[in-house]
Amino acid sequence: MSRRLAPIVLTLLAVAAWGPALHAAAPKAVADTESVLRPARAAYVNLAGKGFGRYRFVATPDWAAMLAEQEKTNPEGYRAALDLFAKVRFDVRVGPQGDAQVSHNTVDSPNPQTTAGLNQVYSGMEQTLTGFFQTWTPFMVNTPFPPEGAASKVQDAGTHYLVDWEETGDVKVHLQMDRSFAITTMKVKSPAFDSTIRPTFERQKGGLVLAGYDAEFVSTASSMRLKVLISNKAIQDLPLPVALDLSVWMGAAAKQQILMTFSELNLEKKK
């Protein structure tokens, strides 16, 4: 045996010797799926079950941070942009089912080019906020599991559970969660796009609260990757987002970072 190959062969022999111990146990089907899904649903905060009705706030991006590169190359344009963006106001209303509606005022601009730029900002912020709450809702408003009685498959893989089910519109959902029911990966396959979400949670007294996520969204036309950090605050005893730190990669483009804070917070509970 040559000296160059000896370490490689010895390593392979060591791996082979430990192989049976390293292989995870084959997942076993859980006959009574509700024995797993019932406590899993109960592990999440479930805002709807705690009286969540409507959440309204003003979203304010950190324009200075977002335009930091422009400050270096075009200080005069940077100051003009900050003065303009300071006049923009985004009002957000999140309904009882977690659907977000974003509205904004219209700022007077000095020329058509600036108007076109503002329209891009309006559209981008609306897409960012509505997209965030579309991801936030399944984990926070209700629970991210199939409703009781729906057809599903649950497997026990020893260190974690695997759950699979289908929804209307030829949508297939697969998730993996640990033994404490915290989801580590959720995959959604649909005719329009495929997504993979890896959420992280804060363990609070009322249940698991979404603290952030990494996600990939892929369609035939485009791809996007996200990393989101969420700052939560108790409002009338309900944990709600009050600030976001989003990093976005569109296709092969460079990262865009969007920081925003929420103010004028108003929560309406169901009567």
Image (cartoon, rainbow, N blue to C red):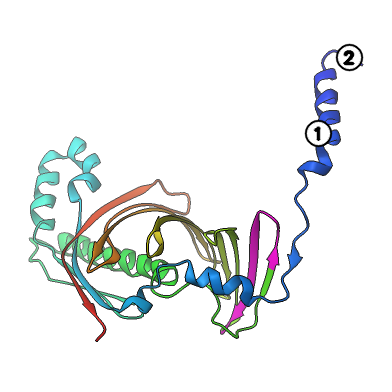
Instruction: Using the image as rendered, state which of residue 150 and residue 116 is in the foreground.
Output: 150
Examine the structure image and report whether residue 156 is included in the region drawn in magenta.
Answer: yes
At numbered mark 1, what does the secondary structure look like: helix, strand or loop?
helix
Q: How many marks?
A: 2
Q: Please give left or right for residue 157 compared with residue 51 in the image.
A: right
Instruction: Using the image as rendered, state which of residue 9 and residue 128 is in the foreground.
Output: 9
Question: Mark 1 packing: few (<14 Cα in 10 Å), some, or many (20+)?
Answer: few
Q: Amino acid at mark 1?
A: Val
Mark identifier at residue 226: none
Q: Above or below — where is 27 with respect to 248?
A: below
Examine the structure image and report whether residue 92 is included in the region drawn in magenta.
Answer: no
Location of mark 1 (residue):
15
Q: Residue at x 7, y 52 (%)?
A: 83
Location of mark 2 (residue):
2
Instruction: Using the image as rendered, state which of residue 128 and residue 24 is in the foreground.
Output: 24
Magenta stretch: give its range: 155-168
Q: Residue at x 64, y 62 (%)?
A: 161
**Quadrant where the image shows the N terminus:** top right
Separation of residues labelled 2 and 1 (CA atoms)? 20 Å
Q: Please give left or right for residue 14 compared with residue 54 in the image.
A: right
Residue 208 in the image: state x and y as whole percent: 43, 62
